[in-house]
Image (cartoon, rainbow, N blue to C red):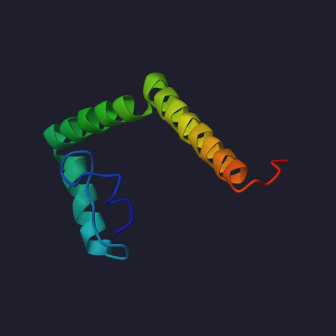
Amino acid sequence: MIGADVVEHGRTGIVFEVGNASKLAESLASVLHDADLRDRLGRAVRGSVEESYSLQAVAGRCVDLYDKLLDLGRRDRANVEARGEKHG
């Protein structure tokens, strides 16, 4: 299933097997005809996106990645120096 790692079935969307046209049609009909389902899915996915992709969340992940890269660089430099090699 494509997107099953991103979409939480029944909470932030509807997941179905690739190529399953009848399940796609059934899912679309459910969302089209059920206003409560549309609203619930819409609110849940919006909240999930706002939480995961807010400026603070994305900036925090960038800082974490930067810190990890700095740490890797420090370790690489220490390993080179421990072996007595020149660091270029």
Q: Is residue 84 left or right of residue 57?
A: right
Q: Position of residue 26 (x, y in %)?
A: 22, 64
Q: Position of residue 54 (x, y in %)?
A: 44, 26
Residue 5 placement: quadrant: bottom left
Residue 85 placement: quadrant: bottom right
Q: Is residue 68 left or right of residue 74?
A: left
- Please report the residue visible at 60 percent of the width from the left and 42 percent of the height from the top: 69
Q: Quadrant of the N terminus?
A: bottom left
Q: Is residue 46 left or right of residue 63?
A: left
Residue 22 vertical position relative to residue 86 in the rendered view, above or below? below
- Say which of 59 and 22 sits in front: 59
- Say which of 45 and 78 sits in front: 78
- Say which of 44 and 23 sits in front: 44
Q: Which residue is farthest bottom?
A: 19
- Please report the residue visible at 32 percent of the width from the left and 73 percent of the height from the top: 21
Residue 50 vertical position relative to residue 45 in the rendered view, above or below? above
- Please report the residue visible at 60 percent of the width from the left and 46 percent of the height from the top: 75
Q: Position of residue 47 (x, y in %)?
A: 29, 31
Q: Is residue 88 left or right of residue 51?
A: right
- Say which of 62 and 54 sits in front: 62
Residue 36 placement: quadrant: top left
Q: How many marks?
A: 0
Q: Position of residue 78 (x, y in %)?
A: 65, 46
Q: Which residue is farthest top?
A: 56
- Please report the residue visible at 83 percent of the width from the left and 51 percent of the height from the top: 86
